[in-house]
Image (cartoon, rainbow, N blue to C red):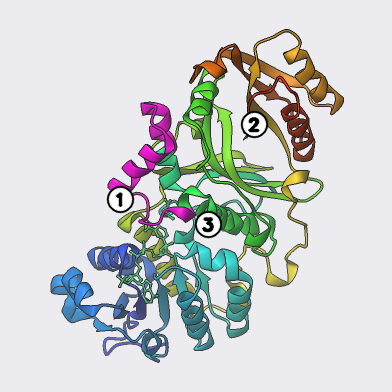
């Protein structure tokens, strides 16, 4: 360990890769709070080198802090710099970020990253490389931004057998759904608002198709259940096909629709899924509005716990990144075997519990369909459900908003079922759609009681 001339431990040196929203936020928070942070960490933490594609752009952001860091466009040079102890990867994506992270690990450096896509897809390779080299890969910011959910799952709840996690873990989609519900907007208009306000990415596909939430759910499932990260096995459905009509009907039935990331332990295996979900409006998590995030974790000892806060943005995310820098600084000299394992469980004790295919998942369902308003239609539908052992919990018939004359004499039926296997509801839907009196496809949404 190096000490300065007064016998104080010298600051730990960090190389930052990428200087966008999170990179610059991290730099600013660390600089602003450096005195308190070093009192907590036991030594200073200094970002001494920053790699950016466009140094001129970064120079503007750095302003009078420019003199304290060396800017370069040579990312590999930062990763190879022997004076650096920690590499903070704030680039994103799975290409160059993967190469640089593996190279940093190979060089014996600890890594801090906010990159959920990288860890959900390449986590197994990265954690194994880090284990071999005895370095840490810290990723608090990768899930739910500023909410310390990784720390909670990995350490605070370590006594528990986790039963399930259900999270609103994508702020962009929660903002869109809130706007659709509160202002009656359709999806396209709400998305345009999210982009105008800077919540959604210029290319919002990962957000609205549920992929970003599935990356985060994959990481939480691995930590909660001690299984490898398996993004490829996650079921992913976004909100692009969600109709404002269903948000309204759900409301009338006492539910809110949220894009939930769900990881649940069952006797058959692990459910890992992201999809729009009806949840009772009276649940706390149903009332998380706008771009905020919340994660509900149920442990066998503690019961339900709920974590709420900002899941994105420069400084909320930097809050998590800096917490990781402090953790790594404290544990830098610790025996690697005494550190908290990356996925909470010892790497040689990860389980092979299968991730269940969506057909094997159990849920209750909201079904909406348009039918000819005539005798016997409802009886035909309930017969199909009964034959498959699916029981009905609630039923609503709504006058359809007639769009043209051909739809006169039609009505909307909304059904809520009790729990059944997904494959049963799929069979029921195809049989119902084959009825001559059914005039639309069946809209199907999954439901969670979360009690
Ligand atoms: P930004 O796009 O704002 O910043 C990314 C930075 O990386 C920029 O400096 C960019 O350079 C640089 N960069 C991008 N691609 C390359 C490349 N191929 N080669 C070299 N440099 C590159 O992203 P964010 O700061 O928003 O996100 C960073 C990470 O943090 C991502 O993994 C993201 O998922 C994660 N994250 C983000 C949150 C947020 O609120 N924004 C919240 C939680 C996690 P240039 O400026 O030249 O484009
Ligand atoms: N695009 C993400 C969101 C950013 O909307 O939540 C944080 O990961």
- Magenta extent: 177-206
Q: Which mark is residue 198?
A: 1
Q: In the displayed orientation, state which residue is furthest to the left.
A: 64
**Disc 1, disc 3: CB below 8 Å?**
no
- Mark 1 vs mark 2: which is more N-terminal? 1
**CA neighbours of label 3 inside 10 A, class few (<14), some (14 to 19), many (20+):** many
* Label 1 or label 3, whichever comes before in sequence order: 3
Image quadrant in which you'd find residue 419: top right
| Residue shown at the point (23%, 79%) measured from the top left | 55
Q: Nearer the viewer, residue 410 or 397?
A: 410
What kind of element bears circle 3? helix
Residue 125: % across, % down: 62, 76
The residue closer to the viewer here, 121 or 142, is 121
Q: Secondary structure at mark 1?
A: loop
Does the magenta run of residues contain 200? yes
Q: How many marks?
A: 3
The residue under the point 76% across, 10% down is 376
Residue pointed to by mark 3: 150
C-alpha distance separating marks 1 and 2: 35 Å
Q: Residues within 10 Å of mark 2 (few under 14, many from 20)?
A: some
Q: Tell which tag, 1 or 3, sits nearer the viewer.
A: 1
User: Visible in this render: residue 255?
Assistant: yes
- Find the distance from the CA under tag 1 to the CA under tag 3: 26 Å
Element class at badge 2: loop
| Numbered mark located on residue 441 in the image | 2
In this view, which residue lies farthest toward the right? 387
Quadrant that contains the C terminus: top right
Q: Where in the figure is residue 44, as x and y percent of width and height? A: 31, 75
Instruction: Please tell me whether the stretch drawn in magenta is mainly helix, strand or loop.
Output: helix
Q: Is 98 located above or below residue 445 in the figure?
A: below
| Quadrant, the N terminus | bottom left
């Amino acid at each position: 360990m190096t000490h300065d001339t007064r016998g104080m431990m010298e600051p730990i040196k960090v190389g930052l890769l990428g200087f966008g929203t999170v990179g610059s936020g991290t730099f600013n928070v660390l600089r602003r709070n450096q005195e308190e942070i070093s009192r907590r960490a036991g030594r200073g933490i200094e970002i001494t080198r920053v790699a950016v594609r466009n140094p001129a752009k970064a120079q503007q952001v750095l302003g009078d802090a420019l003199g304290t860091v060396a800017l370069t466009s040579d990312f590999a040079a930062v990763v190879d710099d022997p004076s650096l102890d920690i590499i903070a990867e704030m680039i994103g994506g799975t290409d160059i970020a993967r190469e640089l992270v593996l190279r940093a690990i190979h060089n014996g450096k600890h890594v801090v990253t906010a990159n959920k896509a990288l860890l959900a897809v390449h986590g197994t390779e990265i954690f194994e490389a880090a284990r071999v080299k005895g370095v840490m890969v810290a990723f608090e910011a990768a899930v739910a931004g500023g909410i310390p959910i990784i720390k909670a799952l990995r350490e605070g709840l370590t006594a528990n057998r986790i039963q399930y996690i259900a999270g609103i873990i994508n702020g962009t989609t929660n903002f869109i759904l809130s706007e659709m519900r509160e202002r009656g907007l359709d999806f396209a208009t709400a998305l345009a608002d999210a982009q105008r306000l800077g919540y959604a990415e210029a290319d919002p596909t990962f957000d609205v198709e549920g992929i970003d939430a599935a990356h985060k759910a994959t990481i939480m499932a691995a930590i909660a259940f001690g299984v490898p990260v398996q993004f490829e096995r996650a079921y992913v459905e976004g909100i692009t096909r969600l109709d404002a009509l269903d948000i309204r009907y759900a409301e009338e039935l006492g539910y809110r629709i949220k894009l939930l990331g769900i990881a649940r332990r069952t006797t058959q295996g692990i459910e890992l899924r992201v999809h729009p979900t009806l949840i009772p409006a009276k649940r706390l998590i149903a009332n998380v509005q706008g771009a905020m995030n919340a994660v509900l974790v149920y442990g066998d000892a503690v019961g339900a716990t709920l974590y709420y806060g900002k899941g994105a943005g420069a400084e909320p995310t930097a809050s998590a990144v800096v917490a990781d820098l402090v953790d790594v600084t404290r544990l830098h000299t610790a025996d690697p075997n005494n550190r908290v394992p990356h996925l909470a469980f010892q790497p040689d004790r990860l389980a092979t519990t299968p991730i269940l295919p969506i057909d094997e998942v159990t849920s209750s369902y909201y079904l909406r369909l348009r039918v000819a308003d005539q005798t016997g239609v409802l009886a035909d539908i309930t017969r199909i459900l009964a034959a498959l052992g699916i029981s009905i919990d609630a039923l609503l018939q709504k006058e359809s908003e007639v769009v043209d004359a051909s739809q006169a004499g039609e009505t909307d039926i909304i059904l809520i079922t009790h729990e059944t296997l997904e494959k049963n509801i799929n069979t029921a839907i195809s049989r119902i759609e084959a009825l001559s009196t059914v005039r639309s496809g069946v809209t199907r949404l999954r439901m969670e009681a979360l009690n």
